[in-house]
Image (spheres, helix red, strand yellow):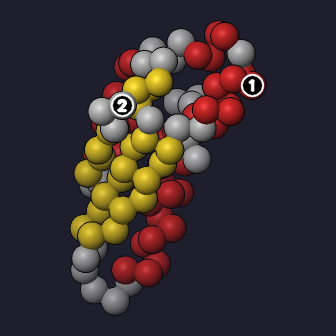
Amino acid sequence: MKLHHQFDLNNESIVSLGRERMSIPPYMIEELVTSMTKKGYTVLKSSAYYMGIPQSIIVVKEFTGPFVTHFTGKIKKDFDAVSKKLGIGELFK
């Protein structure tokens, strides 16, 4: 079974953070994707961008067995942990 979670860009956080936060370097998003890939996830970025940031990121994980429901929340926890570590935790909801 494939589980996925879509993280949409939080436009309000960009506006409320001010101009200095609006210029997120592209390597920050790539670091997020790389870190999630190292954890065993497939990561898909939207082809639509807002100020150089993808409109959404979809994280997919292939699970088998009876513990699928347990891992549903794990995707969100892993994504939140990696994005907070990079300092961009508030960009996606």
- Dot 1 falls on a residue whose secondary structure is helix
Residues at marks 2 and 1, CA–CA distance in whole angstroms: 21 Å
Q: Is residue 93 above or below residue 14?
A: below
- Label 1 crowd bin: few (<14), some (14–19), many (20+), radius 10 Å: few
Q: Residue furthest bottom?
A: 66
Q: What residue is shown at x 38% (from left), y 84% (from top)?
A: 67
- Quadrant of the rendered structure where residue 91 is? top right
Residue 5 lies, in percent from the top left, at 42, 59
Residue 47 lies, in percent from the top left, at 30, 33
What amino acid is at disc 1?
Answer: Ser
Seen in the image, is 34 located left or right of residue 93? left
What amino acid is at disc 2?
Answer: Ala
Residue identified by numbered label 2: 48
Residue 11 lies, in percent from the top left, at 61, 32
In the image, which disc is placed on residue 16? 1
Decide if residue 23 is in sight here.
yes
